[in-house]
Amino acid sequence: MRVDIVSIFPEYFAPLDLSLIGRARENGTLRLAVHDLRSWTHDVHRTVDDTPYGGGPGMVMRPEPWGEALDALAPDELSPDGHTLPRLLVPSPAGVPFTQAMAHELAAESHLLFACGRYEGIDQRVLDHAATRLRVTEVSLGDYVLFGGEVAVLVILEAVTRLLPGVLGNAGSLDEESHAHGLLEAPMYTKPATWRGHEVPEVLRSGDHGRIARWRRDEALARTAARRPDMMAALPPDSLDKRDVAALDRAGFQLPPGDVAK
Ligand code: JAH
């Protein structure tokens, strides 16, 4: 996968040299380039921002450097290597929610282009113009405001890179993890069996794989009920059996009336 990032703070992306992302870059799984937006300015001050039309606090990113950056990184003429146009991703608190499902979608793309805004954001015409020829997605990591899109890009890239073929040693573990099956994961433990007076649950040391699977499901249900009402509401009605309902009842969770467990 090819990835281009445009930012006024290219230094933010130094961590992408490290660990599993760094290795994916070294072995060619991830072809990543970081670009300084100011390289597409022409004035002595390398200006990228100006005051907002309509008034209000803060500054807005001017369209001209962004226009040149997108022209350079997503040229209209198909490149000789036959590359298709990139998908443009713009982190913004006003974007659509980033999810594990979107991470899978992005991992199937051949070229991603990230535009990192700062200040109050990028002049809307940049995104409107880009959308006349590229697929543009404004994406949010959650309902909070950062100084800019850089940290959001680090998060998105980490979620996507680990889904690329060959990046994780055990690809089979991908579909067992949190958010893959609509419940939070059960807690995990390792040795020693007793630590500072806290014991690993007996069932996990029993070797009884049926009991262990049932215990993990009960814990996943109890946790999800306690922490994530949004995930409980999104569970397909037929996804809970009688034992699930009993586990939720023990955890003090009231199922909405009318839900019949199979
Ligand atoms: C803030 C440009 N959902 C996380 C998130 C993503 C981007 C931004 N803030 C929060 C942001 C200022 C300028 C982007």
Image (cartoon, rainbow, N blue to C red):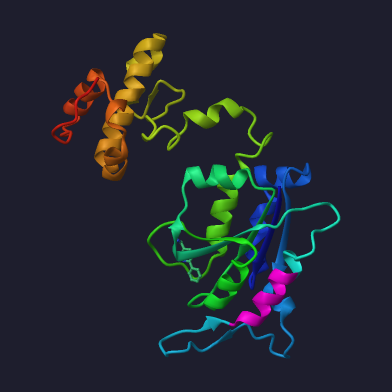
Q: Is residue 188 magenta?
A: no
As drawn, is 65 to the left or to the right of 191? right
Image position, residue 85 (x, y; %): 70, 57
Image position, residue 210 (x, y; %): 37, 11
Q: Residue at x 57, y 58 (%)?
A: 153
Q: Is residue 20 above or below residue 194?
A: below
- Viewer-side residue, 250 vs 129: 129
Q: Is residue 199 visible?
A: no
Dominant secondary structure, magenta? helix
Q: Residue at x 52, y 76 (%)?
A: 124
Image position, residue 216 (x, y; %): 35, 23
Q: Residue at x 68, y 57 (%)?
A: 86
Q: Give the extent of the magenta segment.
A: 62-71
Q: Is residue 143 visible?
A: yes
Q: Is residue 60 above or below residue 182?
A: below
Q: Is residue 65 magenta?
A: yes
Residue lying at the far left in this picture: please name it.
257
Quadrant housing the C terminus? top left
Image position, residue 196 (x, y; %): 36, 30
Q: Is residue 198 above or below residue 30?
A: above
Residue lying at the far front in this picture: please name it.
132
Q: Is residue 119 above or below residue 206?
A: below
Quarter where residue 13 is shown? bottom right
| Number of numbered markers | 0
Quarter where residue 73 is shown? bottom right
